[in-house]
Image (spheres, coloured by chain):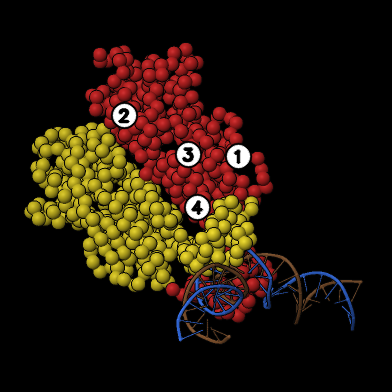
Chain colours: A red, B yellow, C blue, D brown
Amino acid sequence: MAKTTIADVARLAHVSVSSVSNLLNGRSQRMRPATRKRIQDAIETLGYSPSFAARQLKTGYSPFIGLIVPSVADPFFGSFARYVEEAASEKGYQVLLGNSERDSERERNYAEMLWSSGVRGIIFGSSLVKFNHLEHLYQEGMHFVSFYRSAHSGDQFIADSIGVDNIQATRLLTKHLLALGHRRIGFVSGPTDMICRLDRLEGYYKTLEESDISIDQQLVWEEASGDTGSTSFIELGKQGAHYLLSLPEPPSAIIAINDMHAFGVYAGARDLGVNVPDDLSVAGVDDIMLSAVSVTPLTTIKQPIRDIARLSVERIIDRLENDRGQEPVHLMLPSTLIVRESTARYRGRSAG
Amino acid sequence: MAKTTIADVARLAHVSVSSVSNLLNGRSQRMRPATRKRIQDAIETLGYSPSFAARQLKTGYSPFIGLIVPSVADPFFGSFARYVEEAASEKGYQVLLGNSERDSERERNYAEMLWSSGVRGIIFGSSLVKFNHLEHLYQEGMHFVSFYRSAHSGDQFIADSIGVDNIQATRLLTKHLLALGHRRIGFVSGPTDMICRLDRLEGYYKTLEESDISIDQQLVWEEASGDTGSTSFIELGKQGAHYLLSLPEPPSAIIAINDMHAFGVYAGARDLGVNVPDDLSVAGVDDIMLSAVSVTPLTTIKQPIRDIARLSVERIIDRLENDRGQEPVHLMLPSTLIVRESTARYRGRSAG
DNA sequence: CGGAATTGGTGTATCGATACACTAGCCCAG
DNA sequence: CTGGGCTAGTGTATCGATACACCAATTCCG
């Protein structure tokens, strides 16, 4: 229970607290080597480490950054969180985790808790379409970095963003499927309440248009019910597959909004006796670890998630440590198509 | 940038800071309703929220709990983290995340960082076999709850634990496979540096012994190389499957230390043209979300992970808020066998 | 050799919230 | 009319670290 303080160290080293503080804060050139050594030894023997709370109170500086993702139970965001944490700890920061479940009310509560905790920077693993619920914190001095950048410009709200071109992502997938001969390509989206989802949908629409394929709204499955958040991605993918494959003219290929949904599509197809990839090509986005080794390895878009995590952390720390009110930064990293076995050449109407 | 303080509220409400503090700390009976209302209004209009750092400095109370898991990129620990976070936030606590990568040095660094941050309670998502590297923090007053309890008694170190009976887990699986007629049952473990792994291995050994089946050490694959931590579980499972299936007398069933390893075993079997479940039964432990919907749904052990998370949080908060030096608490929750399609009756030597 | 400049420190107000110790004013009993 | 007990507050030392302002002793230099 013995909480060692700076005063204990000073006493043991026969110096003032100021000197200890000076050493701790890199002003050690104002000190004879012998004195420095005495202080360092005292710190060592007492096992002293400064109280972050006291330091924060005095300096306003907090060694925490917030990370808000829809859910770390999702492997994609789990990986993202792991990389964010890795990068942050290398820079001496710790990560406070929050799961928003894509609910703006929860997101707001978190952000406010974080503000109270002295946190001045938050990384959003995924962005709700609207950001207004956080604007008041931004006014007070909170910094935000969001994972995705809306390609729809005109955000009323200023945050840095680092992410991938989601329009490009589904464009690559759509082109890939078109090249394989598919013409009826379904899209399993789930709720379109996040920017990345709107963009992915847009990439799909645009590419079809450019190829003069008429868009059939029936082929786009957007939502199960109003039941946002609580239903797992896998379950949603399954529901989407059930719907699309039960259409009078079912698609011969399905793009899922992400890999977890794609696995749900696998399951849904299996339920209906539809074989992947023989009867149905399936593609996702994210390239989570399991995608490479699932029994039918999944064609997907690889996102440079580790780079995104590291850049996000760097960006937020830069804002925290030397914000000079720069313009918002928007980075867009390339994503790449990874073709595996879940997509195959169109074989005509395989079953009727 | 305007940081509202308790003094601002006091000024606006025409009361002393003491009164505001009294209201904030549940001493509101010492106050006329009208006064209380004035203060509440002032808090509202200023959007005031107290500084946790200042509060912590004065009271020693910290609203954070630490969570250290091997890696949140692992879906099992991702889910666990999500539930821990959920339970914590309901109680007004926030979660500081750390990924140990099963490295005791990293674990120690985290724990010390957390100590500096004023955190006095840490939940370990999984326990290394030895805990000595944390003992000094325990002496100073840190509280620990660990996910697994060693059934090997005689821990020199005192922490609460909440978990499942890992011996029972693999016992259920082994019995299940024996009942299906399997006699050569392989075990893919990976490094046995964590308590839960030793226990799972033990359950396997004991059950075989009880059934008078001689133990063939060749059938137990423990480690790839010294390369702890960095290799993914899937990759390890794959390596294990390659090894086991290349034996002169390969097993007809494989138990994997967890579901991620089991998926690796799927992949490894596929590489060698071995069909699951026809030629090889595979079972895991954890029941992660994907296990139910993978193309061959996985037989596994379901752990009551949400309950474990909630109980861990309750335990640690109880220690934080009213520790009276009680004896360590050890809870063991039941786990259940879930039979899916990855395990099948032994068919004799199907190939080879 | 005297004054300026440098070296090697130290004293202390301050950050924001808390809670103990205190009190002004009022009521009522004796 | 005095004093004990209550209500509805308030004053302020304190938590631990920081950093500005300050200072004593030494060194430098013309």
Chain that bears disc 4:
A
Which residue is drawn at the image coordinates 31% and 71% (left, top)?
B326
Query: Would you identify the image quadrant in which residue B340 lies?
Result: top left
- Looking at the image, residue B236 lies above or below residue A347: below
**Residue beneath disc 3:** A126
- At label 1, which amino acid type do we have? Ile
- At label 4, which amino acid type do we have? Met
**Of the image marks 1 and 2, the number of the one nearer the N terminus:** 1
Does label 3 lie on the same chain as label 4? Answer: yes
Chain that bears disc 2:
A
**Residue beneath disc 1:** A158
- Looking at the image, residue C2 lies above or below residue A290: below
Q: CA distance from mark 1 to mark 3?
A: 15 Å
Chain that bears disc 3:
A
Query: Is residue C22 left or right of B259 when viewed as pictured?
Result: right
Chain that bears disc 1:
A
- Looking at the image, residue A252 lies above or below residue A39: above
Judging depth in this view, the residue of A133 and A155 nearest the camera is A133
Circles 1 and 4 in contact, beta carbons < 8 Å: no
**Residue beneath disc 2:** A239
**Of the image marks 2 and 3, the number of the one nearer the N terminus:** 3
Which residue is drawn at the image coordinates 55% and 65% (left, top)?
B19
Mark 2 vs mark 3: in front: 2
**Residue beneath disc 4:** A113
